[in-house]
C-alpha cells in the first residue's frame, strides 16, 4: 500500500507531532469539561445557599394584617386565594418566574393554653390555630379525616338582646408527631383556656380532634405547610419564680400548630377573645433551579421595583424578603469560585502555550533540512509555510476534536456551549500560525543566523522583551490584588487569567537569565580540579543558554502551573478534612437524637470501645437550653444554645484527640478549668466564641433538668463541642458534670469515638448494645465522602486534576525539547573528548551531566514559583462577607500536604527522563562521527536561532 504523500512528508517529525496531537486532545477535553464543572459548581452554590437560608429570607413573603375594615380585605377562602393570584401576577416578571408554588396560611397570632392537657403530657401545652387551603393536597390522614365546620352556640340576653355568652366547638387536624407527643386520638376533646374578654361577653371554646395527618409521599420537611404543621422541638420558656433577683425554675412549654377548616373560624376566635390578631401570609416559594446567572442579576432591580410599587398589591400586604441579599451572597460566592478556577486555568494556559510552542518549534526543526532543500530548489516561502502549517494544524485539530468528543462521551460536558470549542480552536489556530511563521522565517544561511543571534539587534530585542514581560506581570499582579472578586456576573476575569500566567513566564525568563551567573562559580571551582568530566559538563550547561533558553523557560512555566494546581488541590482536601472533624468531633459519633428522651445504658462506653478500630470513647449530655444575663429585674428571654454536660478530664482528653489531626482547627481546653463552685453555687462554664462579649458577670443557664447560676470562665473553639451546637442554637456552653446536683440532666445521650477513621464502620457501631434504630451514627469517613460528592468540591477538584494531568504531559514534552536541544552539543563534546583520551564510559557521563543541571534548575525554579504564586496573588477564600465557609479551599488558600509528593514526582521525571534518554541512545561511535565532516554545521542548522 502506497504511503500518502502528506504523511511521507512529515518524515522525522511524526513522533513529535503525534505527541503534540495527544496533548492537544487533552487540552481540548479540558476546555469541554471546565465549563460543565463551572455550571455544576454554580448550581450547587445556589442550591446549598438557598437550602440553608430561612424561608422568610429566601421566599417572597407578603403578609396582610387585619388593620383595615375595608370591604376589600379578604375574609373568605376564595377571596384570600384570589388575592394571592393577583399579587403574584402584579410582581415583576423577573420575580414572578422564580416562584414555583404559592403557600397561603391564615394564622391566629395568640397561643391559647390547654386547660386539661392529656395525662401523657406533664408540661403545659399551647396551641396555635391555622388555616391553609393546601392542607388536603399536602397531607394524608392516618386517622380520621379533614376537620369540618365549627359549631357556635350563642346565648342572648333577653333584656337588651345582646349576646351574653358564646360556646364554640372547633374541629381541628393535628400532625402525627403532635398526636403522639400529646397522646391525642380522633374524637379527643380538649378545653382551651381563652383569655378574659374586655367586654361582658363570656367565651368558652373547646376543640375536637377530627383527623391526624402525615405528609403525602414526596412531601418533605421543607414544604411550606410542614414548616408550620410539624415543628419537632418545644420552645423552652424561662419562668422566674424566685423574685426579682433570680430565677429558680424554668418551665418547658410545648407549642404545636393545628389546622381548622375555614378562615372564618379564626376570625371568630379573634373577635370573641379580643386578644391577638390573625395574619394572612402569602408565601411565594422560590425555586432554586430557576436562579440562573441572569435571574440572579435581575433579582435586585426587580425587588426594588416591587417594593416601590407595593401600593399596587391587593389585600393591604407588606412584601418582605431577604432574596436580594441572598442573591448578592450567591453571586459573590460564585464569583470567588470562578476566580479560583480562572487563576488556576491561567497558570495552565501559560504551561500549555509554552509546551505547544516548544513542540511546534521542535516539529519545524525536525523538518528543517527538507525546508532548506525545497527553498534551495526554488519553492515559494509562502507556499511552504502554508503547506507545512496546514499539515500540522489538520493533525492537531483532528485530535483536538476527538478529545472534545471523548469528553462529551464521558459525560464531562456538552459541545453546545461555545466555550467548549475554545480548546479545539485555540490549539488549531496556534499550531497553524506558529508553524507557518517558523517555516516562513527559516533560511539557509546559518552564519547570518548566528550573527543575528549574538548581534546588537537581537540583544536589544531580548532586553525589551524581558523588561516588558516583567512589567506586565507586575502590573497584572497589582491590578488583580486591588480589584478583589471581580466580574460577579460570571464572565471571564481576564486579569485573573493573565496574572498567574505572566508571573510564571517571568519566572522562566528570570531562570534563563540566571543560568550564567549560577554556573559561573561552579565552572571556576571545577576548573581547578584535575578531573575533566565535571568541568566540561558544567561549562557546556552554563554556556549553551541560547540553545536551551526556550526549553528551560518552558519547564519553569509548566512546573509552576502544576505545583500551583496541586497546592490548591491539597487545600481542598485539607478543607474537607477540617470541616469533617468539626462536623463529627472525632472518628465517629453516636447520637441519641432525634429521640430526646433516649440515653445510653450503663456499660455502653466499655462495649463501644471494643468495636474494631475504636481507641477510646467519650460520652456527654447535650441538650437544648438557653443562656441569659441575670439582672436586678430578673432574667430576660434566654438565647437558645446547646448545653453540654461533661466530665472535665475526659472532655480535655477527647478535645486534644480531635485536635491531633494537623488539619483540625480549634483550641485546647484551658488547664485552669474547671474551678470549684463558689459559695453561692455559681458554676464556671466554658462558652463558644460566638458568645464572647455578650455576657458578663452571672448568667442563667437553663436545660432540661432546670437552671443553674454560672459565670463564663473562657471562650474555646472545640471541634468536639462544635459538632453538636445545632441542638439548641448556633452556640454552646460546656458545664462540668456533678457541680450542680439539682440541675444534673441525667445519663449521657451523645458519644464520640476516637480511632482509625477508615476502620470504624457504621454497621459495627449500630451493633453495640444500647444503640437503637432511632440513634444517629456518623463517621468521619462518611462525612468526608459526602463532602467530596458535593457539586462545588467535585467541580473544583476536577479542574485541579485536569490541570495536574495536563501539566505532567506538558512537562514531558518540555523535557523532551530540552534533551533535544542539548543532545547535539553533549554528544559531540563527549566524542571530541574521546579524541584526547577520555574513556567511552566517562564521555557518556559528560553527555548525561550536560542537560541534567539545567533540567534540575528548571524544576527547582518552577516549584518555587508555583509555591510562591498563591502568596503573591493573595487569599482566594473570600466567600460571602469574607467568611471561610464560602470557599472550597482552606484558610491560607494553598495547602502544603502534597509538596513532598509533587517535588518527588518532578525530580523523578527530570532525572529519570535524562537517564532514560541516555539509555535509549546508541553508544557514540567516534569513527562514524569523524567521517561526517559537516556534522557540526548540520547540527547548528537544527538548533540555531534560540532566544
Image: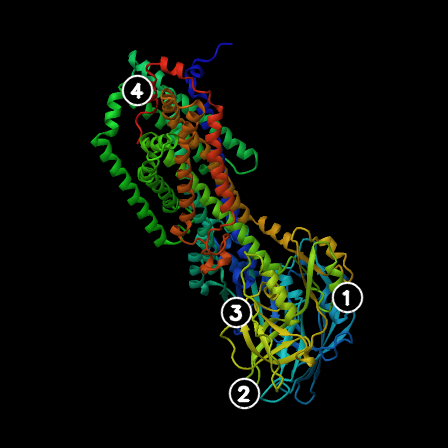
Real-space Cα separation, disc 4 to disc 1, in angstroms: 89 Å
- Give whichever of discs 4 and 1 has the lower sequence position: 4
- Give whichever of discs 4 and 3 has the lower sequence position: 4
Q: Quadrant of the C terminus?
A: top left
Q: Which of label 4 and label 1 is nearer to you?
A: 1
Real-space Cα separation, disc 1 to disc 3, in angstroms: 35 Å
- Within 10 angstroms of label 2, few (less than 14), some, or many (20 or more) residues? few
Real-space Cα separation, disc 2 to disc 4, in angstroms: 96 Å
| Residue 893 vertical placement versus 250 (above, below) | above
> What residue is pinned by disc 4?
382
> What residue is pinned by disc 1?
603
Judge from the rendering whether residue 667 lies leftward or rightward of residue 776; answer left or right. left
Q: Which of label 3 and label 2 is nearer to you?
A: 3
Judge from the rendering whether residue 357 lies leftward or rightward of residue 740; answer left or right. left
Q: Position of residue 114 (x, y in %)?
A: 71, 78
Secondary structure under badge 4? Answer: helix
Q: Which of label 1 and label 3 is nearer to you?
A: 1
Judge from the rendering whether residue 158 lies leftward or rightward of residue 35; answer left or right. right
Q: Position of residue 657 (x, y in %)?
A: 61, 61
Observer-nearest of 309 and 617: 617
- Give whichever of discs 1 and 2 has the lower sequence position: 1
Secondary structure under badge 2? Answer: loop
> What residue is pinned by disc 2?
632
> What residue is pinned by disc 3?
690
- Give whichever of discs 2 and 4 has the lower sequence position: 4
Q: Which of label 1 and label 2 is nearer to you?
A: 1
Secondary structure under badge 3? Answer: helix
Amino acid at each position: 500500500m502506497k504511503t500518502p504523500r502528506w504523511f511521507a512528508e512529515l518524515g522525522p517529525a511524526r513522533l513529535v507531532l503525534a505527541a503534540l496531537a495527544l496533548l492537544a486532545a487533552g487540552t481540548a477535553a479540558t476546555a469541554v469539561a471546565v465549563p460543565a464543572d463551572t455550571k455544576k459548581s454554580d448550581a450547587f452554590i445556589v442550591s446549598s445557599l438557598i437550602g440553608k437560608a430561612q424561608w422568610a429570607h429566601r421566599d417572597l413573603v407578603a403578609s396582610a394584617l387585619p388593620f383595615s375594615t375595608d370591604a376589600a380585605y379578604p375574609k373568605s377562602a376564595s377571596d384570600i386565594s384570589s388575592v394571592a393570584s393577583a399579587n403574584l401576577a402584579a410582581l415583576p416578571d423577573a420575580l414572578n418566574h422564580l416562584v414555583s408554588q404559592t403557600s397561603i396560611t391564615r394564622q391566629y397570632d395568640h397561643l391559647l393554653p390547654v386547660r386539661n392537657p392529656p395525662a401523657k403530657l406533664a408540661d403545659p401545652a399551647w396551641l396555635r390555630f391555622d388555616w391553609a387551603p393546601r392542607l388536603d393536597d399536602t397531607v394524608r390522614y392516618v386517622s380520621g379525616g379533614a376537620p369540618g365546620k365549627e359549631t357556635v352556640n350563642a346565648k342572648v340576653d333577653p333584656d337588651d338582646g345582646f349576646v351574653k355568652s358564646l360556646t364554640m366547638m372547633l374541629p381541628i387536624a393535628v400532625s402525627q408527631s403532635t398526636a403522639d407527643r400529646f397522646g391525642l386520638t380522633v374524637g379527643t376533646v380538649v378545653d382551651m383556656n381563652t383569655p378574659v374578654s374586655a367586654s361582658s361577653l363570656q367565651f368558652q371554646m373547646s376543640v375536637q380532634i377530627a383527623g391526624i395527618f402525615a405528609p403525602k409521599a414526596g412531601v418533605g420537611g421543607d414544604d411550606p405547610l410542614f414548616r408550620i404543621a410539624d415543628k419537632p422541638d418545644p420552645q423552652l420558656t424561662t419562668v422566674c419564680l424566685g423574685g426579682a433577683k433570680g430565677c429558680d425554675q424554668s418551665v418547658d412549654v410545648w407549642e404545636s400548630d393545628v389546622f381548622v377548616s375555614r378562615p372564618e373560624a379564626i376570625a371568630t376566635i379573634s373577635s370573641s377573645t379580643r386578644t391577638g390578631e390573625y395574619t394572612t401570609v402569602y408565601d411565594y416559594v422560590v425555586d432554586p433551579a430557576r436562579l440562573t446567572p441572569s435571574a440572579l442579576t435581575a433579582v435586585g432591580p426587580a425587588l426594588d421595583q416591587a417594593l416601590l410599587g407595593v401600593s399596587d398589591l391587593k389585600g393591604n400586604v407588606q412584601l418582605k424578603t431577604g432574596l436580594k441579599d441572598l442573591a448578592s451572597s450567591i453571586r459573590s460566592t460564585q464569583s470567588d469560585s470562578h476566580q479560583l478556577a480562572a487563576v488556576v486555568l491561567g497558570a495552565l494556559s501559560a504551561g500549555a502555550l509554552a509546551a505547544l510552542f516548544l513542540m511546534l518549534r521542535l516539529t519545524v526543526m525536525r523538518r528543517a533540512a527538507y525546508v532548506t532543500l525545497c527553498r534551495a530548489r526554488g519553492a515559494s516561502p509562502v507556499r511552504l509555510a502554508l503547506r507545512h502549517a496546514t499539515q500540522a494544524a489538520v493533525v492537531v485539530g483532528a485530535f483536538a476534536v476527538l478529545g472534545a468528543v471523548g469528553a462529551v462521551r464521558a459525560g464531562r460536558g456538552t459541545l453546545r456551549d461555545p466555550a467548549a470549542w475554545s480548546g479545539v480552536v485555540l490549539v488549531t489556530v496556534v499550531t497553524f500560525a506558529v508553524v507557518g511563521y517558523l517555516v516562513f522565517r527559516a533560511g539557509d544561511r546559518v552564519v547570518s543566523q548566528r550573527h543575528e543571534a549574538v548581534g546588537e539587534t537581537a540583544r536589544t530585542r531580548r532586553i525589551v522583551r524581558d523588561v516588558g514581560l516583567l512589567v506586565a506581570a507586575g502590573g497584572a499582579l497589582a491590578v488583580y490584588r486591588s480589584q478583589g472578586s471581580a466580574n460577579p456576573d460570571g464572565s471571564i476575569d481576564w486579569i485573573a487569567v493573565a496574572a498567574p500566567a505572566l508571573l510564571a513566564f517571568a519566572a522562566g525568563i528570570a531562570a534563563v537569565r540566571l543560568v550564567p551567573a549560577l554556573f559561573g562559580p561552579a565552572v571556576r571551582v571545577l576548573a581547578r580540579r584535575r578531573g575533566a568530566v565535571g568541568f566540561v559538563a558544567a561549562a557546556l550547561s552554563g554556556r549553551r543558554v541560547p540553545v536551551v533558553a526556550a526549553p528551560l523557560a518552558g519547564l519553569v512555566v509548566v512546573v509552576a502551573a502544576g505545583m500551583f494546581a496541586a497546592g490548591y488541590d491539597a487545600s481542598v482536601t485539607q478543607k474537607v478534612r477540617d470541616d469533617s472533624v468539626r462536623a463529627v468531633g472525632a472518628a465517629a459519633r453516636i447520637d441519641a437524637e432525634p429521640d430526646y428522651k433516649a440515653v445510653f445504658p450503663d456499660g455502653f462506653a466499655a462495649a463501644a470501645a471494643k468495636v474494631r478500630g475504636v481507641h477510646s470513647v467519650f460520652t456527654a449530655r447535650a441538650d437544648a437550653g438557653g443562656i441569659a444575663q441575670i439582672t436586678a429585674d430578673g432574667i430576660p428571654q434566654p438565647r437558645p444554645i446547646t448545653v453540654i454536660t461533661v466530665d472535665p478530664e475526659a472532655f480535655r482528653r477527647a478535645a486534644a484527640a480531635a485536635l491531633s489531626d494537623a488539619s483540625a482547627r480549634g483550641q485546647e481546653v484551658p488547664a485552669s478549668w474547671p474551678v470549684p463552685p463558689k459559695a453561692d453555687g455559681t458554676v464556671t462554664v466554658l462558652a463558644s466564641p460566638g458568645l464572647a462579649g455578650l455576657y458578663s458577670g452571672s448568667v442563667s443557664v437553663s436545660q432540661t433538668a432546670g437552671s443553674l447560676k454560672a459565670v463564663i470562665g473562657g471562650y474555646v473553639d472545640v471541634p468536639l463541642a462544635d459538632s453538636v451546637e445545632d441542638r439548641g442554637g448556633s452556640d454552646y456552653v460546656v458545664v462540668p458534670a456533678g457541680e450542680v446536683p439539682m440541675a444534673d440532666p441525667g445519663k449521657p445521650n451523645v458519644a464520640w469515638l476516637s480511632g482509625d477513621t477508615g476502620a470504624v464502620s457504621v454497621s459495627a457501631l449500630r451493633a453495640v448494645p444500647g444503640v437503637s434504630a432511632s440513634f444517629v451514627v456518623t463517621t468521619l469517613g462518611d462525612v468526608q465522602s459526602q463532602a467530596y460528592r458535593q457539586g462545588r468540591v467535585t467541580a473544583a477538584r476536577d479542574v485541579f486534576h485536569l490541570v495536574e494531568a495536563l501539566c505532567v504531559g506538558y512537562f514531558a514534552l518540555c523535557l523532551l525539547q530540552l534533551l533535544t536541544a542539548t543532545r547535539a552539543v553533549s554528544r559531540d563534546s563527549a566524542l571530541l573528548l574521546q579524541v584526547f583520551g577520555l574513556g567511552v564510559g566517562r564521555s557518556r557521563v559528560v553527555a548525561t551531566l550536560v542537560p541534567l543541571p539545567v533540567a534540575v534548575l528548571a524544576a527547582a525554579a518552577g516549584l518555587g514559583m508555583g509555591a510562591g504564586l498563591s502568596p503573591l496573588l493573595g487569599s482566594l477564600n473570600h466567600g460571602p462577607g469574607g467568611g471561610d465557609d464560602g470557599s472550597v479551599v482552606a484558610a491560607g488558600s494553598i495547602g502544603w500536604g502534597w509538596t513532598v509528593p509533587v517535588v518527588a514526582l518532578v525530580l523523578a521525571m527530570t532525572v529519570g527522563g535524562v537517564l532514560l534518554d541516555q539509555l535509549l541512545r546508541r553508544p557514540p561511535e567516534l569513527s562514524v562521527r569523524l567521517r561526517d565532516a559537516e556534522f557540526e554545521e548540520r547540527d547548528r542548522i537544527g538548533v540555531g536561532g534560540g532566544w
